[in-house]
Amino acid sequence: MVKTQSAQKLSSGSQAPNFSLKGVDNKIHNLNEFNSKALLIVFICNHCPYVKARISDLVSLQSKFAPSELQIVGINSNDPSYEGEGFDNMINFAKEYSLNFPYLIDETQHVAKEFGAVCTPDPFLFDESKKLVFHGKINNAIEPDAIPTVHTMEENIHKVLEGKKNDISKDFDPSVGCSIKWIG
C-alpha cells in the first residue's frame, strides 16, 4: 500500500473524458448512457483499505438519491494482474459490498490517465452537462479507521441538484488512498 493524495489534471468546468468499459454485469458502459443531474465517477479497486473503508459510504450515497438525480460509477484502473485485482475479483467485490452502481474495468488504464486519477478512491463529481464541479474526498474520514463527520461529497451533490454548484467552496479537495497500480 502506497498512500497517495489525488492530483488535479482536470480543472473545474472540464468535460468528462469519454469511456467505453466493461462492467461486472458483463455489459459495456459508456459515459453517454449516464444522464443523471449529478454524475460521480470514482476510481476504486478491490484490495485498498481506503476503498474498503469508504465503499459503504458510496453505496449509502447512491441509495439516498434517485438514479435521475445521482449516478455513481466505479472504475477499477489497477493492473489486473496485481494481487486481489482483475475482473473476477471485481465481481466478487461487487457482491461482497452489495454495490448498487456500475463497477467497470479500465484494463488499459487509459481512462484513469485521461481523468488524471492517481489513487483509490479518487472521486470526480460532474453536473448534468458532464462538466467537472468537484474533484476530491468523499468525506472527512481520511484514514481507513476514521469515522466521517463531514459528508463533503453528499453536500456537494445537494448543491448541484439545487442549481447551486457555484456554492461549492472548493473545486479540488484532494482525496487520499492507495496509489493506482500501473502496468509495467
Image: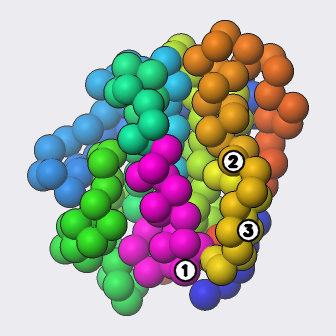
Is residue 30 visible in the rendered structure shown here? yes
Q: Which residues are magenta?
A: 43-61
Q: Which residue is mark 2?
A: 151
Is residue 3 found left or right of 30 in the rendered image?
right
Q: Nearer the viewer, residue 139 or 38?
A: 139
Which residue lies at the image location 23% right of the left edge and 51% below the top edge? 23
Which residue lies at the image location 80% right of the left edge and 42% below the top edge? 172
Q: For residue 105, which numbered disc appears in the image?
A: none
Residue 16 vertical placement versus 25 (above, below): above
Residue 129 vertical placement versus 119 (above, below): above
| Amino acid type for the residue under numbered disc 1 | Pro
Asked if residue 41 lies in the magenta stretch, the reply is no
Q: State the image coordinates of residue 26 (x, y, percent, origin top left).
A: 12, 52
Is residue 78 visible in the rendered structure shown here? no
Q: Which residue is mark 3?
A: 142
Which residue lies at the image location 81% right of the left edge and 48% below the top edge? 173
**SS category of the residue bearing label 1:** helix
Q: CA distance from mark 1 to mark 2?
A: 19 Å
Q: State the image coordinates of residue 33 (x, y, percent, origin top left).
A: 30, 25
State which mark lies toward you, 1 or 2.
2
State which mark lies toward you, 3 or 2.
2
Farthest residue toward the right? 169
Q: For residue 49, which numbered disc appears in the image?
A: 1
Q: State the image coordinates of residue 107 (x, y, percent, origin top left).
A: 34, 62
Q: Nearer the viewer, residue 23 or 66?
A: 66
> Mark 2 or mark 3, which is nearer the start of the sequence?
3
**SS category of the residue bearing label 3:** loop
Is residue 24 found left or right of 181 in the rendered image?
left
Q: State the image coordinates of residue 120 (x, y, percent, origin top left).
A: 57, 66
| Amino acid type for the residue under numbered disc 3 | Ile
